[in-house]
Amino acid sequence: MDSFWRAIVWAQFGAAIDMLDNALVACPDALWRQRLWRDPVDHPLPPGRAEFWYVAYHALFWLDLYLFGSEEGFAPPAPFALVEQDDATGPIPEQPYTKDELRAYLASVRQRCRAAIETLTDERARQPVDFPWTAGRPISYVELQLYSMRHVQEHAAQLALALGQHGIHDECDWVARAKDGPSGN
């Protein structure tokens, strides 16, 4: 994969991660454990899974896993748990992760994401990966990363919406390119 495409992918992927970080920074303590929404079919999600902190953790967990490229052998760093690979109705950690813990996880995953994109070879980009949701039809590693970028942006937007509904707007402005993108942005 040539450097032109790697720079473009990082500029946009990094921007999505930066927007998630902006939401974490802007979240007041009073909103950290607040339930953000109900399931679309009006069945309540299990306690905690729709809270601000957990939505952020969910986005980071899957970003980390998708960068790894396989469920086999993956484990998030301590203190984080594999609860995301369990049934979506299963238990979550007894105590919510703190903002500092999640921001440290974000910084670590962001750094690994940038390195993965900057060193992405054509061979790695084309490498097939298979997850249960691909229904036995593997996709390429690079498509998985684009899927992951969309997933991060989806949850960054959900968190920004929740903040906006509580009068917090300016801290969650649109990020056009990664703060450390190719043109020094």
Image (cartoon, grey):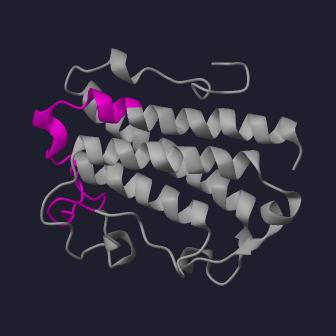
Residue 89 visible in the displayed image: yes
**x then y, percent, for residue 13:** 61, 40
User: Taking 46 as reference, is 20 above or below it?
Assistant: above
Query: In the picture, residue 86 is in which quadrant?
Result: bottom left
Q: Residue at x 15, y 37 (%)?
A: 31
Residues 1 and 146: in front is: 1
Residue 161 visible in the displayed image: no
**Start-end of magenta stretch:** 22-51
The answer to whether residue 50 is left or right of residue 119 is left
Q: Residue at x 42, y 53 (%)?
A: 59
Q: Residue at x 24, y 45 (%)?
A: 52
User: Taking 155 as reference, is 75 above or below it?
Assistant: below
Q: Count numbered badges in the picture.
A: 0
Query: In the picture, residue 93 is in which quadrant?
Result: bottom left
Q: Quadrant of the C terminus?
A: top right
Query: In the picture, residue 29 is in which quadrant?
Result: top left
